[in-house]
Image: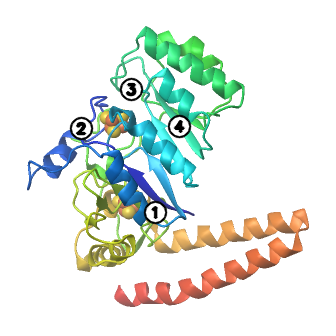
Amino acid sequence: MARKIEVTTRMGCKVNCRYCPQKLALEKYFAADKKRESVLSFEKFREYLDKIPRDVQIIFSGMCEPWLNAECTDMVEYAARDGREVDIYTTLVGMNHEDYRRIRNLKLHYFVLHVADKDNNATIPVTEEYKSLLKEIVEGHKSGRLPITSISVHGQMHPEICDIMKEAEGVPVLSEIYDRAGNLESDEGVTISQKGEKKGSLCCTKCNGFSLDDNYLLPDGTMLVCPMDWGLEYELGTLETESYEEISEGKVKQEFRKRMRSSKYGPVLCRHCHVSQPELAYRASCFFYGLKQTARKLLKGDKTEMKQAAEGAAQNRAEEVPQYAEGVLQN
Ligand code: SF4
Ligand code: SF4
């Protein structure tokens, strides 16, 4: 699984989805310093990107609709042309036809659309301009210019876009609404929530076990531990003054990992998060996934790839055993 940085191009998202802890994030972000940078500039984005290793996926999503920053298309273009693996998650709010025509010429990894719903759970204005852009995007998808990877909708699709979206039939539609690790004020209407506190040693199925390498980047260069940290409890450091490596293996992450392994070190968000999993179950699923991959390669008859996969799996197991032993001892 690749390392990821989810880029927040500005603080404060006017889409204001009912199931998004915007208020909490804003309060916490400006709690200590009201003058904190609220918008990521293109110059700063370039500066931070230069500090991020090339194997890290760059994801435009984060704590705000990316196109609520007027320089978003420049950033996407820059990252993609720099040879980065780029994902886009967008509601299209703030995007126009010209932006779309620029990004559809790029090599993107994922292009995920969050569309308007019937109950206005996401405040996406269904204007003629929005429908016209959506239509062009769906046509682009059909012609293979920029395929839509998946569609997200908070409830039932808005009736005025159903005909347009019919043309994207076959694209997976996700409508789960999760509780953001307990960071929502109310869980009314939420379809996935974690009731009660999880016990024992936990791994993250989203952030690669204990690696915790799916981080958020905020407009002032701050990196957060994970996409559930809307209360900004775990600021890992800042790319403004530190290197990615310093932040990635800094004290905050190490402390976070200890707490994942055992509650005796203190509370941790993962105990209230639907994507955490008991360590044993996580390691078993990784093991079987590795086996499945090796079997696939065996069936394909590619001996070189098969040998590499087997060696990789053996190496991973060798690294995991001491880590697992350490976890057991700490508990
Ligand atoms: S568009 Fe995304 S960031 Fe903005 S309010 Fe909705 S879920 Fe939150
Ligand atoms: S709270 Fe823990 S389990 Fe949930 S996404 Fe973050 S690191 Fe992963």
Amino acid under disc 4: Val
Instruction: Determine which residue is flagged by label 1.
Output: 207
Instruction: Determine which residue is flagged by label 2.
Output: 12
- Give the mark nearer the N terminus: 4 vs 3: 3
Instruction: Return the x and y of residue 84 as percentages of the image width and height.
Output: 55, 55
Instruction: Determine which residue is flagged by label 4.
Output: 112
Displayed-image quarter of ligand 2:
bottom left
Confirm if mark 1 falls within 8 A of ligand 2. Answer: yes
- Give the mark nearer the N terminus: 4 vs 2: 2
Instruction: Determine which residue is flagged by label 3.
Output: 93
Can residue 274 be seen from the camera position used here?
no
**Which secondary structure lies at badge 4?**
strand
Residue shown at 48% from the left, 20% from the top: 157
Instruction: Return the x and y of residue 188 as percentages of the image width and height.
Output: 29, 34
The number of numbered badges drawn on the structure is: 4
Residue shown at 18% from the left, 44% from the top: 26
Check whether the beta carbons of the residues at disc 3 and disc 2 lie within 8 A of each other.
no
Q: Quadrant of the N terminus?
A: bottom right
- Residue, far right: 301
**Which secondary structure lies at badge 1?**
loop
What's the CA distance linking mark 4 and mark 2?
Answer: 21 Å
Amino acid under disc 3: Val
Picture disc at residue 224: none
Instruction: Return the x and y of residue 38 as percentages of the image width and height.
Output: 21, 44
**Which secondary structure lies at badge 3?**
loop
Amino acid under disc 1: Cys
Can residue 57 be seen from the camera position used here?
yes
What's the CA distance linking mark 3 and mark 1?
Answer: 28 Å
Disc 4 versus disc 1: nearer the observer: 4
In the displayed structure, 293 sits above or below 75; it is below
Mark 4 residue crowding within 10 angstroms, few (<14) / some (14–19) / many (20+): some
